[in-house]
Image (cartoon, helix red, strand yellow):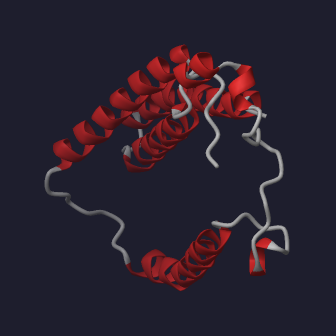
Amino acid sequence: MRQPALHTEEFADQGAEGMAGLPLHGSAWPKLSGAEEAGAEPDSRPAAGAGRLLVVCGLLLLPWLYVLATGLPDTATAAHWPVAWVGLDTMEAVGLIATGVLAAHGDRWNPLVATATATLLVIDAWFDTTTASVGSDLAMAAAMALGAELPLAALCVWLAVRALQQRR
């Protein structure tokens, strides 16, 4: 059975009396067989397999990190450098706007969008500071990271965690 969210029109239309037969969030769902009898949710097997695949891929990246650390040149020229930075900042702007709108409306997608936006902001701070040349460029990158990007990322994480805690 599906569970209508408490803040939807469906709940308002049916009222609390119409919900008597539906399990509420966090309540036990009927167990089926196999992994479900061991206490796992019915759809957890594909997620567990995907989780194992991600762990293997992460472990396989570890030797590649050594190859990169020892083989990459100290400097490089990048084609489409402005497109890369404008694209990243565009994604950040869209993420900040979407996070703000979703947070203001208490939308269930807010934690996901806020987390993605925080990730983009941290990546921007990292690459700004690590690609800046010593001097005024590095000072500007550090100021932007410490004064804007990282505080905004922290705000997005706070919004995501707060929204998830309110669902419990």
Give the side of residue 124 with respect to residue 61, left or right: left
Q: Residue furthest left?
A: 79
Q: Residue at x 36, y 75 (%)?
A: 72
Measured as percent of width and height from the top left, residue 81 is found at 19, 48
Q: Quadrant of the C terminus?
A: top right
Q: Is residue 26 above or below residue 31?
A: above
Q: Nearer the viewer, residue 161 or 44?
A: 44
Q: Nearer the viewer, residue 3 or 144?
A: 3
Q: Nearer the viewer, residue 59 or 18?
A: 18
Give the side of residue 85 with respect to residue 21, left or right: left
Residue 147 in view of the camera: no
Measured as percent of width and height from the top left, residue 109 is found at 52, 34
Q: Residue at x 63, y 33 (%)?
A: 160
Give the side of residue 58 with respect to residue 100, left or right: right
Find residue 155 and report its image quarter. top right
Residue 75 in view of the camera: yes
Q: Is residue 44 above or below residue 106?
A: below
Q: Residue at x 57, y 29 (%)?
A: 156
Q: Is residue 58 above or below residue 77?
A: below
Q: Is residue 45 above or below residue 87?
A: below
Q: Nearer the viewer, residue 139 or 152?
A: 152
Measured as percent of width and height from the top left, residue 51 is found at 62, 72
